[in-house]
Amino acid sequence: MDLNWLTITEAHKGLREKKFSAVELLDDCLSQAEKVRDLNTFITLTPESARAQAGKVDKKIAGGEEISILEGTPGAIKDLLCTRGVKTTCASKMLENFVPPYSATVVDKLERAGFVDIGKTNLDEYACGASTEHSCFGPTLNPWDKRCVAGGSSGGSAVAVASGQSLFAIGTDTGGSIRQPASLSGCVGLKPTYGRVSRSGVNAMASSWDTVGPFARTASDAAIVLNLIAGADPLDATTPPVAVPDYTANLSKGVAGLRIGVPKEFFGEGVTKEVSDTVWAAIREYEKMGATVREISLPSTKYGVAVYYVTMPTELSTNLARFDGIRFGHKPEEEIENLYGYYTEARGEGFGAEIKRRIMVGTFVSSAGYVDAYYKKAQKVRTLIIRDFEKAFLDCDVIMAPASPFPAFRVGEKASDPLAMYLADVHTIPASAAGIPSISLPCGFSGMAGSGVACDAGAARGLPIGLQIMGPQFAEGLILQVAAAYEQATEWHKMRPGE
Amino acid sequence: MKLSKEQVLKIAGLARLKLTEEEVSRLSNELTDILTYVEMLNEVDTEKVEATSQVTGLSNVLREDSVRAAPCEPEELLACSPLPKDGNQIRVKRVL
């Protein structure tokens, strides 16, 4: 019955009206997961506990009880978030057998909301990468073209949603790890404001950058999930006490009078023509809907990647210091007598190449004699990026740009060139630097750029292209409203791969 | 900034990472590339700019110093360790 392709809202309605059961909905997701197994989406599938939860919801419905919006809805969790009793690997050999004794706050909240957890999705090791190729379990493949990457680091979560294995998924975004794979794999991905969603129980990558957010098929579904996971958490002191509005409240209000800023720096060198044309076509669509468009400049954002690749590795190397093979982690094969040798061996064997590279960079730029020239300098330039955005938001309500300079690249294409891989996040890092919310949504495909023709669902060719919409801090409601307006005017979000 | 193999080994020691010889020579080149790239930051005038260490303006986030129910049992925490246990303790390698 293809229940796995429903939106959260449609599934909820169907469950309430007893058109199908939560177990049937889950079974369609699981059989799709089996069908597209070669995409390597999941590290761990949990069909048994999922069936038990779905069965519980069905009993409730049969008993005439009301169910809440997410109850019985299959979702997937990036394997960076701790799930009590379920292996949480971070796609690292270091944690290949780690079973956390507690769950992330986000997971707890979703469980209380009654979702059906189908499993843990693949990622770049410790969320470090832009292609999911740096997973010790192998890359996740792009559902539109298996020769291409899914994007990363939350590649598994993006593909779970984009290929119909799950109705929504949770990912994390430090420098683009939700928006970039959403763009490359063809679904909606929302990076909330820094601190909007608790990081408790999420393996820390770069603590001043890390955010947690949803992947979904529509802006409305992303809003539904954000409603349930947002808010201050006593277990994460960086979650500000800002009230959580109903993010679904304004989704049908349209964009009349909206002021859109388009930063010229995001359409320059390195951006493919079809990405540029496709994103501009989407922006023109907003003009038709009554928005005004003006070109703006965010001059300091060109330093975003450099700022990121100094501050992030510093924070990462500090955070990963806890993986020492003692309280948790990998135990070296060989018997080692002294503690120092045990540490170096456990970490040398447990971490993959990209993690070692970043730990080395971070240790160097924060070491005595270099910390001022690199780390502190980068923190200052970060301030300038923040000021650019503050200034821009005086004259515009949202900022639109490509989420990625190019559609999905080939598996292996950038794997041996770390810098080329880092530059894949050039358009997502600036919003991360400023801690502002940003969403990527499908706005077209490669090979049909500028045609302006809405395709019938299922008639896709080429690779997805994502439109990025950034807003001021805590303006998630606004960017979701703006994204929803585009979905009401176009059909791109209805396209499915592999048909 | 060019990083020599000796510097790579020194950093690896600070980071408690054992590297193979092949990794040392590869990292020497890759780290040099990355550091050369990020040196573009030097062209920015940051004379009068404050450093950003957090972005939402929070300061002094306080809470009651009260005991909370533990999310898990001591045995569950001990089970996370790959090392042998001795009662409620983990047996580590010789420190000195």
Image (cartoon, coloured by chain):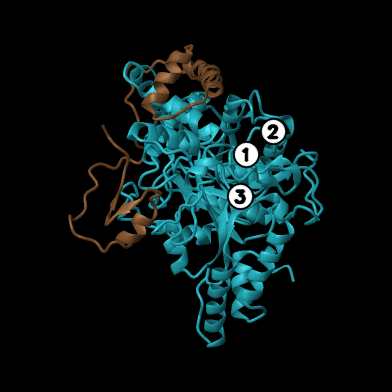
Cα separation between marks 1 and 2:
8 Å
Quarter residue A176 falls in: top right
Q: Is mark 1 on a helix, strand or loop?
A: loop
Residues under numbered marks 1 and 2 in contact, where contact means CB atoms less than 8 Å apart: yes
Q: The brown chain is which one?
A: B
Q: Is mark 3 on a helix, strand or loop?
A: helix
Q: Is residue A458 above or below residue A355?
A: below
Q: Residue at x 53, y 87 (%)?
A: A64
Counting from the top left corner in percent of width and height, residue A412 is at: 69, 33
Residues under numbered marks 1 and 3 in contact, where contact means CB atoms less than 8 Å apart: no
Chain A representation colour: cyan
- Residue A133 is tagged as 1
Counting from the top left corner in percent of width and height, residue A137 is at: 60, 46
Q: In this view, does A355 lie above or below A202?
A: above
Which chain is indicated by disc 1? Answer: A
Which chain is indicated by disc 2? Answer: A
The earlier-in-sequence mark between 2 and 3 is 3
Q: In this view, does A247 lie above or below A148?
A: below
- Label 1 and label 2 in one chain: yes
Counting from the top left corner in percent of width and height, residue A404 is at: 63, 36
Nearest-to-viewer mark from 1 and 3:
1
